[in-house]
Image (cartoon, rainbow, N blue to C red):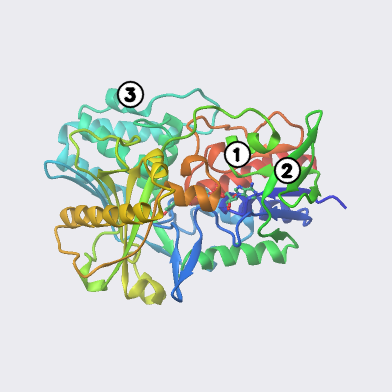
Amino acid sequence: MKPSLVVLGGGLSGLAAAIRCARYFPDVVILEQHIRPGGLNSWYYRNGRLFETGLHAITNFAAADDKKAPLNRLLRQLGIARDRLRLHPQIGSEIRFPGGRVLPFSNDFAELTENIGKVFPKSRPAFLALTDWLRGFDPFAAAPFRSARAFLRQSLPDALLADMLRCPLSFYGSSVENDMDLSQFAIMFRAIFLEGFCRPAGTIKDILDLLLERYQELGGAIRYRAKVAAIVHEGGQVRAARLETGEEIECRFLLSTIGHAETLAILGKEIPKEAPRLGFVENIFSLPRASLPADRTIIFFNNGETFRYGVPKNAVDFSSGVLCMPGNFHGLSAASPEMAEPSWLRATHLANYEKWREIANDQAQYQATKQTMAAASLAEAEKILGISLANSVCEDSFTPLTVARFTGKRHGAIYGAPDKIKDGDLGFANLFLAGTDQGFLGIVGSMLSGVSMVNRHILPKL
Ligand SMILES: Cc1cc2nc3c(=O)[nH]c(=O)nc-3n(C[C@H](O)[C@H](O)[C@H](O)COP(=O)(O)OP(=O)(O)OC[C@H]3O[C@@H](n4cnc5c(N)ncnc54)[C@H](O)[C@@H]3O)c2cc1C
């Protein structure tokens, strides 16, 4: 019997899509190339200790009784009780720019408004008007690209405020260099400023285990080390996914979450010459809990004269980035021994894939460059935090090459291509796209993408 749905990729969008479909049609199969699920947000063991590959924070925090909030809607669609996630809200985050410009914000939106009033008094009324406008704006309506950067410059008297607002939203969800699509800006504004950050107790492994448990109790199947090498199709209809081994898995519907160009490649179609370019490095430091500030969860910083969110000339651009202290969520260290001691600092910066690729064949040089990069990143973190981090240990660093190697993402671009296929339509009767290149980014975004593509294209036709 042909499965109702085959999902390419066991990342968060693939898992969410598969659960959603399996609630009605249990004969769903996920094909995942790696040895475990999670994709960009996964985990590995080193010297007996679990390391997360991503997970700074989950966006879109909302109170449990806010029925319309994206997070609660997502959990309802998956049939997962919210208390299974044991969510802990952030302590507080900030945006830090030169000249002592600092905008602290939390899950209480009034805090950001108040701080904007203090730092940019001239812009406060315009910011409130912008917020009202964004609350009424439908970011999911089909629309051509509209520059959020230009829109903000028009809307706010202080250009610096416009850049400061773009900084966290870009780092956590823009695939466009030095700009953002206005719809994506509106989604991220809500996800980060209006709703805010939280973190489940435990690690990403607990979230993935929960999703897998739900999927398997519904009857769904997942196969690991199952790299799809080709999609077999004829006359606009997909017949099967062909694995590297030559095995063919027939299906009624196929949903790909591996990326747009990556899907075109295995369809045997021409792929866009321009590869997505935005890559990142991340360094994971461990250190005694008492060494880190306890009152900040995430710091988004820029030290440059203007905020540049683009591919750097060098391998890494240390002038901006994200410092995340994933143990700093209310009540988290008591609920999660993994986050208590030692504590963690994750430092993320923009990176240039090509520069890293140039040295990839010389392992000694690649490793040495990673070490130098981690040291420079730590020095930057010391400046931003205003403390010595001499007692920290760099546990691991990843580059755009690491992301490309483990997830198959072209150029290791975690947010995929700038042009999104918002309707998920790839021009086939039974093949659709979900995940990063469909348009929603981040953990909640990618899961919503999987669910919404199944609701829109697959469930009504099965
Ligand atoms: C370091 C880092 C930190 C992050 N931190 C956060 C955070 O704190 N909060 C947040 O909201 N978001 C964060 N993100 C972003 C978030 O992880 C992603 O947006 C989300 O996980 C994307 O999920 P996806 O399913 O669309 O894609 P992916 O995770 O890329 O899933 C695609 C899957 O397809 C598989 N695959 C690829 N090719 C094939 C093939 N040919 N055959 C079979 N399988 C294939 C891959 O192995 C992968 O498992 C972070 C990302 C990174 C890299």
Residue type at tag 2 = Leu
- Numbered disc in front, either 3 or 1: 1
Answer with left or right where residue 398 lies relative to residue 288: right
- Does the CB distance between marks 2 and 1 fall below 8 Å? no
Q: Quadrant of the C terminus?
A: top right
Residue type at tag 3 = Ala
Q: Which residue is mark 1?
A: 262
Q: Is mark 1 within 8 Å of ligand 1?
A: yes
Residue 107, visible in the rendered structure: no
Answer with left or right where residue 300 lies relative to residue 52: left
Residue 250, position as x, y percentages in the image: 81, 47
Residue 134, visible in the rendered structure: yes
Helix, strand or loop at disc 3?
helix
Helix, strand or loop at disc 1?
helix
The circle drawn on residue 254 is 2
- Numbered disc in front, either 2 or 1: 1
Q: Which residue is mark 3?
A: 150
Q: Residue at 63%, 47% (x, y): give it.
A: 451
Residue 22, position as x, y percentages in the image: 73, 55
Residue 381, position as x, y percentages in the image: 22, 55
When asked about the image quadrant of residue 355, the answer is top left
Residue neighbourhood size for the residue with mark 1, other residues' Cα within 10 Å, grouped as few (<14), some (14–19), many (≥20) = some
When asked about the image quadrant of residue 169, the answer is top left
Of labels 3 and 1, earlier in sequence is 3
- Does the CB distance between marks 3 and 1 fall below 8 Å? no
Q: Is residue 370 above or below residue 165?
A: below
Marks 3 and 1 sit apart, C-alpha to C-alpha, by 31 Å
Of labels 2 and 1, earlier in sequence is 2
Answer with left or right where residue 255 lies relative to residue 402: right
Q: Residue at 40%, 56% (x, y): give it.
A: 57
- Numbered disc in front, either 3 or 2: 2
